[in-house]
Structures are given as C-alpha cells and as structure tokens.
Image: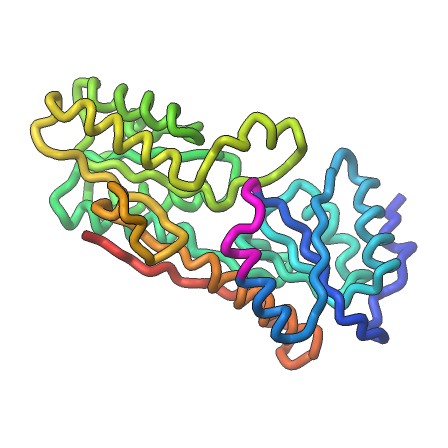
Amino acid sequence: MDTSKNFKPYKPIHNSGKILIIDNQLFTKSLINIGLEQELKEKQYQVFYLQFPYNNKSDIHHIIRYVAQNAFDGIIIINDAPYLKTLVAYKNTLPPIVLVNHFSLDFVCVHFDHLLIGHQITKYLIDKSHSKIAILLNNETLTSTMLLLQGYKQALLRASIAIEPRYIIHGCFTYQHARSAVNKLINSTKSPTAIICTDHFSLNYLNKNNYKEQHHQLPDSMVLGALHQANENKAKLTKPLTISYFSASKELKYNELDSLCRINKPLFKMGQKSAALLCELIENTIKPIKRCTIINTESMFY
C-alpha cells in the first residue's frame, strides 16, 4: 500500500515564520548551523531542531505529522540520512525542502563538488612531482567519500600514474586509525611521498549508540594522527612526507597544521546559502527547476 497517496499536496496557505532543521551531523553546532541560523534570523524566522531516529519506513509519518502540527514554512536537512529515499515519495505533501552537504537529484540541495575537490588536490601534488600519493578515507559508503576517491583516481590516470590499491586506506576515522595507517605506509616497501587526509565534515549522527562510540572524534583528529606519526618516523623517510587535508576555515590554527597543504570547505558560507535558497523557495522568487547549487572550495596550498 502506497501511503503517500493518502496525503494531500502541500499548499503554502500559512506563514508561521518557523523553519525546521533536521540535523544529521555527528558534531553539533557546526559552522553550517551558525551560517543557517544567522541567515534565518535576519529573515525573522524561528528555528526548530530535530534529530530523527529512523528504524523503519513507517517512521517517516512522524516527520509529516510533526511538520503539519507546527505548520513549518520550510525544512532544511543537513547531511545524508537513510530516510531520505523514503521521504521522496512524500515531498509534495511537505513545505519546501533544501538538503545541505549532500547531493540528491530528488531535492533542491547545496553541496560541494567532491569529485572536483579530489581531483584538484591530487593534481596539485602531482604537479609538485609526487607520483606515490596515498589517500586516507573515512566512511566509504558516503557519496562524498566515493566522489573524492573517484577524483583522486582520475587525476592519477590522467597523469599516467598507476593506481596503487595499497595507497587507498579505508576506515580512517580517528587519530589512532590515522597513526596506524601512516605507520604501515611508511614501513612498506614502496612508501608514499604524499598523503591526502579526507575530511570528516559529512559524518552523520545516526543513533545514540553510534554517537557514544564516536563522540571523541574531532574534525582534525585524523590529520593530526597522520602528522604525528610521520614526525615520529622521520628517520625512515628519504624526504619529508607531504600531508594535505581539508579545513572548515581559512583562518590560521596557530599549531602544526598551519604548515600543511589544505583545501578550505566554507561550511559557514554553505549554511548561509542554504538558508537563503530556502527563503527564495518559500517566497517563490526562484523557478522550481533550479535543483542544485554548488559551493566551490578555496585552495590554500603552501
């Protein structure tokens, strides 16, 4: 039985001045949130947060009832979540929805071009005479991670550099994961000369147990683990290991990370853009065919 057909199409007949943010981030109060809240406050909207526990497809009705009861003008969903595929069938019954930090053909979204980012950082390292480039990945099931890896591989192939499976390390989430991976790479027979540490900015909050296991993670934990292990193994290196990473800010951190190559992902700007886009949808000032906005990263190579 297709229950989505039992719901009436959404009609923008109210103006409650309330926006619902469904937040699937592992880290609360991120720069995305700050950007969202600042923009929505300027538009005089009230912001309501929801972390949605999703166990089966029928749970999606809880969101629909909650939205109807509170008469929200719009919904922002941060990061990928397992219920989004189910939500597609019901989106015509809900107010305008904008996805943040996740690409989908089914919703209006604001996201990063992770394919381009992966290609860009790898090509930069190749141009600096690196041919043995390793990459540390976190959650390989995420679309952003798969696209980063695809961009990395494309840059190598376009430079006629063979892809080494041993240089592609999956499951690097924590400081200790990165230390272990870098130690193994350095002590291998064909150690890399450069390492790309992918970012943690799309990790999702799925349930309380998952959060308790991973709450100790910080956005820079993986790159710090890689850097500290490389420093310990300096004696085994013929030349210093080039480490690159992703940052949420252009500002200096005033620590050892300031000397590394980095790509800035302006999360604050993405939050602002998402909120502005939702307001335009609510006010019907843009055409509904505008499906996606890509926020470009800013390269900060040293």
Residue at the far left in the pictured view: 238
Q: In this view, does 81 lie above or below 234?
A: below
Tell me: 137 left or right of 192. right
Residue 214 coordinates in the image, percent (x, y)? 54, 30
Residue 243 coordinates in the image, percent (x, y)? 24, 39
Q: What stretch is highlighted in magenta?
A: 26-34
Residue 278 coordinates in the image, percent (x, y)? 64, 69
Residue 190 coordinates in the image, percent (x, y)? 17, 23
Q: In this view, does 49 lie above or below 190?
A: below
Residue at the far bottom in the pictured view: 285
Residue beneath the point at 22% across and 28% down: 230
Quick check: is 255 in the magenta stretch? no
Tell me: 64 left or right of 115. right
Residue beneath the point at 68% across and 48% down: 84
Tell me: 216 left or right of 44. left
Residue 41 visible? The answer is: yes
Colouring chosen for the image of the structure: rainbow
Residue beneath the point at 64% across and 75% down: 43
Residue beneath the point at 70% across and 45% down: 51
Residue 157 visible? The answer is: no
